[in-house]
Amino acid sequence: MSQAESNLSRNLQGRHIQLIAIGGTIGVGLFLGSAKAIQMAGPGLLLTYVLAGVAIFFIMRALGELMTYRPVAGSFAVYAEEFCGPFAGFVTGWSYWFMWVVTAMAELTAIGIYVRYWLPDVPQWLPALVALVVLYGSNQLAVGVFGELEFWFALIKVLTIVALIIGGLVVIVFHVGELGSTASFDNLWSHGGFMPMGILGVLLTLQMVMFAYSGVELIGVTAGEAENPQVVLPKATNGIIFRILIFYIGALVIIMALVPWTDLSPDTSPFVFVFEKMRVPAAASIINLVVITAATSSCNSGIFSTGRMLYSLALRGQAPRALASLNAQRVPAAGIHVSAAVMLVGVVLNYMAPKEVFVWVTSIALIGTLWTWAIIMVSHRNYRRAVQAGRVRAASYRMPGAPYANWLVVAFIVIVSGMLWLQDDTRVALYIAPFWFGLLWLGYSQVKSQPARAGV
């Protein structure tokens, strides 16, 4: 590890890192977007989550092994450069930065929309601006402050899901309340079968589910600031994988067992619907608060990750060197300044621009997610080759199934990418991808002759 990387403060504890990754993954897609996915596949959606979850398992184990080998802030961008070449590192770093910037723009807009549920007279841009300013300020403080904020943001989401699972099980087992007479696990296969829309319906939700898992790799960005990384990172990686699968699959099993999937509306959060049927007071307001918390958590993670990624790119000579500066709290303040400024512009543009323009921009973010996951698997495969050749040391934490699992997961990601063509709102990603990578190639051609900083 370079001296520059070690200047980051290692104050993120294991509980922080686990909740950061969980918070970055469990978001609006589960609380709101799952309704549309259920209508497309019925209970067969569970099969999609399991299949995608297996891929995520290997991605996270591969990332965990790489992080144990070299726990740095740039994470997968650094590994891509070391084991796949400088251009791969450049593309990975900038794609991931832009993915989180765009995601943060969307989350800030969501905050503005959902605050108006209670305060309809407040202009939509105001809550978004307040949230950005507060999160920007908190990210300028010591990294432990970010860790605490994200811990409590994520905990609210986790507790909501746990409450649904426990409350739902009570209704199903003891047949209490309004749903008690009809709630049963039989609902998972009694209304048109387990896959009422057939295998095609299941496959059509595959990209939606993979996108729902995006953010799980955020643990990699925390590696440079993890306390005792050789112990904390493997433990956190194992915990995150299984907890996310339990939260996603467990929540959806309970929802579709409590009420037939045919009773759920694609326009209403299944959490709101179920909580109201369970006679939870102010169910809609509770979920609205959770959604705002989820959006705030995601934006918070976006500011954190983009600042660290710009810092890492600058250290390697792939971004302006001014972005490699740290403030008195050993936080990459310059990278946070730039990222937050771009997010602020995004809030304004998203308020003024047509919806179609925003869809085009977010399509690049989807490309960034799939690229990042694929490059993690390829980097891991090349790392293992380097270990066999004796060029680098072997990590104590290992991914099972290599190298076959690496190529199977990459093939799976390619299939998911190809399926973007099947729907109009995702097909645009395939149109934009060549332009995005072409732009990155032009950018790389301008910086490749610049020497990296000493010690990186």
Image: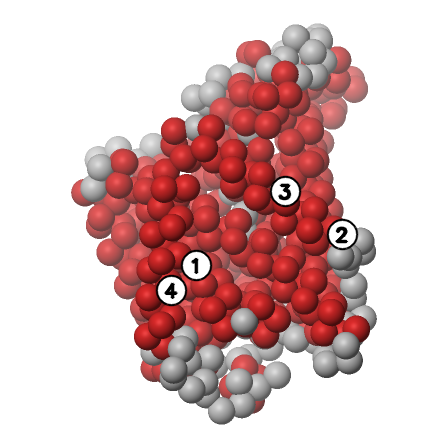
Residue 46 higher or lower than 107, as above or below: above
Q: Which mark is residue 33?
A: none
Q: Which mark is residue 441?
A: 4
Q: x, y percentage for residue 29?
A: 50, 37
- Local SS, label 1: helix
Mark with earlier residue (2, 1):
1
Q: Say which of 372 and 382 sits in front.
A: 382
* The furthest residue to the bottom: 454
Q: Which residue is mark 1?
A: 95
64 sits to left or right of 401? left
Residue 331 higher or lower than 287, as above or below: below
119 sits to left or right of 375? left
Q: Residues within 10 Å of mark 4 (few under 14, many from 20)?
A: some
Q: Closer to the observer: label 2 or label 1?
A: 2
Q: x, y percentage for residue 427?
A: 40, 35
Q: Closer to the observer: label 4 or label 3?
A: 4
- The answer to whether residue 387 is visible is yes
Report how far apart the C-alphas of labels 1 and 3 lie in the structure.
20 Å
- Local SS, label 4: helix
Q: Which residue is mark 3?
A: 412
Q: Residues within 10 Å of mark 3 (few under 14, many from 20)?
A: some
